[in-house]
Image (cartoon, rainbow, N blue to C red):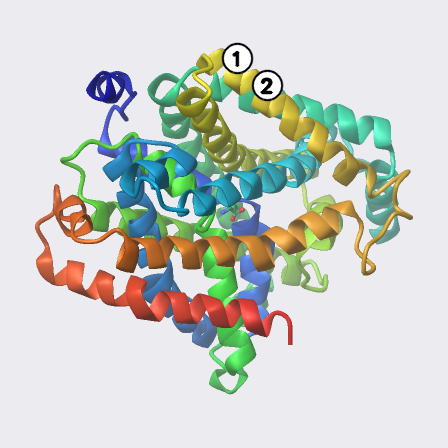
């Protein structure tokens, strides 16, 4: 029975497909609207060095741990821990991860829905109608508080996710990653071309990269670590799930390295696409919603072909969000197909519907429910805060400690399948045993003091 189940579990069609799907998960909203600003504000090139150290020393080892847990068990995050250490309580790490995924997907879909709306609206002339920064602000505020519209777009985006995931790992996720990721890269290059040929774009590059080592302090290092973690989609089992469809010939070290490298590259390039244009048009740099839905539309409005540029940008952002949302949905779907024995179609529709319903309060928290707050945060804010600052780091510690200490000898053999790089294994082991758990625990603790 056991081996039958193993035999029918889907596999990726190619290593490239797997790497693109995993990179698609990692490359998301975080790369575009957060990383570039954080880079510019916290020491430029100096921050980049710190960030890359965090990726290599902590992010990569945890990503490797997730992939090896997935491949070693060929299960969803919940089933994986149960299969590797039967009778222990480690399944809790997987279960918490899946719940975390539901919460992230619920609010991620909301902003993704806005992005989709801005794509449609750009295509129909939103941006060329702007007369000044006030109109960009007004357009944003009236849109996000229009609950009916926001929920409709949330729904539409959820349907996009269903359409991809229902087609399966190879025929859906992998096939679409192979189409969407190169498209995203091309769009980014186009926007970079536009941005860098504007007069005054050098100021934007200076903002992004001018090294200022005096800005590096404990807080900045913790911020870099937190950003690396979220950006690499770690701590809730995406990489466990994607790893569970891997075959034994795939080199986990080099796959994780490629995924992390692509993620960092796109984050830096997003900055090169955005800030030179922002500075050239005399706008103030910022991040998050303000940057994406107000500053950038206004930057586009000042340029020729404004609606085209804006459409290209929001298409890029929609793609980035979609490939991340798909990975979150797949975690839930793999749980339902493995553990509840649902068909993929059924699992996809029910799980996506569930995430949609959980997302509605977040969608409404910018409109009719804006008065409902906890510690000054609305539903959206709470969901974002708890997952990024508490649940993902906790999950990351659990995963690292499991792979480094609890799993035992089996992990060495499993991770060396397809690679045989024993030295790398010892470096990896040192990180997941000591460095990563301590570093991530620090993120957790310092977020609260
Ligand atoms: N990595 C994604 C981003 O940068 C967010 C994400 C986190 C996706 C955790 C899946 C899991 O936007």
Q: Can you tell which mark lies on residue 346?
A: 1
Crowd class of label 1 (few under 14; some 14 to 19; many from 20; radius 10 Å): some
Looking at the image, is 170 positioned above or below residue 121?
Answer: above
Q: Can you tell which mark lies on residue 211?
A: none
The residue nearer to you, when weighing 363 against 409, is 409
Q: Position of residue 309 (x, y in %)?
A: 62, 39
- The quarter of the image holding the C terminus is bottom right
Residue that label 2 marks: 350
Looking at the image, is 212 positioned above or below residue 305?
Answer: below
The residue nearer to you, when weighing 395 against 198, is 395
The residue nearer to you, when weighing 408 against 366, is 408
* Relative side of 363 to 55, left or right: right
Looking at the image, is 424 positioned above or below residue 372?
Answer: below
Res 197 seen here? no
Where is residue 440, by image quadrant?
bottom left
* Relative side of 101 to 354, left or right: left
What secondary structure is marked by label 1?
helix
Q: Position of residue 35 (x, y in %)?
A: 54, 59
Q: CA distance from mark 2 to mark 1?
A: 6 Å
What secondary structure is marked by label 2?
helix
* Relative side of 380 to 104, left or right: right
Residue at image location 55% in from the left, 51% down from the top: 30
Q: Position of residue 241 (x, y in %)?
A: 38, 35
Looking at the image, is 169 positioned above or below residue 274?
Answer: above
**C-beta proximity under 8 Å, tags 2 and 1:** yes
Q: Position of residue 105 (x, y in %)?
A: 59, 37
- The quarter of the image holding the N terminus is top left
Badge count: 2
Residue sitting at the far front:
87
Residue at image location 68% in from the left, 28% down from the top: 356
The residue nearer to you, when weighing 292 against 57, is 57
């Amino acid at each position: 029975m056991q081996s039958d189940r193993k035999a029918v579990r889907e596999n990726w069609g190619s290593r490239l497909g797997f790497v693109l799907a995993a990179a698609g998960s990692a490359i998301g909203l975080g790369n575009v609207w957060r990383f570039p600003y954080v880079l510019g504000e916290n020491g430029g090139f100096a921050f980049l060095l710190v960030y890359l150290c965090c990726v290599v020393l902590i992010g990569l080892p945890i990503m490797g741990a997730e992939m090896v847990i997935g491949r070693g068990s060929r299960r969803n995050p919940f089933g994986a821990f149960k299969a590797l250490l039967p009778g222990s309580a480690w399944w809790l790490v997987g279960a918490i991860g899946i719940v975390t995924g539901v919460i992230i997907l619920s609010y991620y879909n909301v902003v993704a829905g806005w992005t989709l709306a801005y794509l449609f609206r750009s295509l129909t002339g939103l941006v060329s109608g702007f007369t000044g920064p006030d109109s960009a602000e007004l357009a944003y505020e009236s849109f996000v508080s229009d609950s009916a519209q926001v929920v409709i777009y949330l729904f539409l985006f959820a349907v996009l996710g269903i359409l991809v995931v229902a087609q399966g790992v190879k025929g859906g996720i992998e096939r679409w990653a192979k189409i969407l990721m190169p498209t995203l890269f091309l769009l980014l290059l186009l926007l970079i071309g536009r941005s860098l040929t504007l007069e005054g774009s050098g100021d934007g590059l200076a903002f992004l990269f001018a090294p200022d080592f005096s800005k590096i302090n404990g807080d900045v290092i913790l911020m870099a670590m937190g950003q690396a973690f979220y950006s690499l989609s770690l701590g809730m089992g995406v990489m466990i799930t994607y790893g569970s469809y891997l075959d034994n010939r795939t080199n986990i070290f080099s796959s994780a390295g490629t995924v992390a490298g692509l993620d960092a590259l796109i984050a830096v390039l997003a900055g090169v696409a955005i800030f030179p244009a922002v500075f050239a048009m005399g706008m103030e740099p910022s991040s998050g919603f303000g940057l994406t839905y107000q500053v950038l539309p206004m930057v586009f409005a000042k340029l020729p072909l404004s609606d085209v540029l804006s459409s290209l940008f929001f298409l890029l952002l929609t793609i980035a969000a979609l490939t991340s949302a798909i990975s979150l949905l797949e975690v839930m779907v793999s749980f339902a197909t493995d553990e509840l024995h649902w068909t993929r179609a059924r699992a996809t529709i029910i799980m996506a519907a569930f995430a949609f319903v959980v997302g509605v309060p977040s969608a409404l928290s910018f409109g009719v429910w804006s008065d409902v707050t906890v510690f000054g945060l609305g539903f959206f804010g709470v969901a974002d805060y708890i997952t990024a600052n508490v649940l993902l780091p906790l999950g990351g510690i659990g995963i690292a400690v499991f792979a480094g200490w609890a799993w035992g000898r089996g992990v060495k053999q499993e991770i060396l399948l397809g690679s045989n790089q024993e030295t790398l294994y010892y470096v990896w082991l040192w990180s997941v045993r000591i460095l990563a758990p301590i570093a991530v625990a620090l993120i957790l603790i310092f977020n609260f003091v």
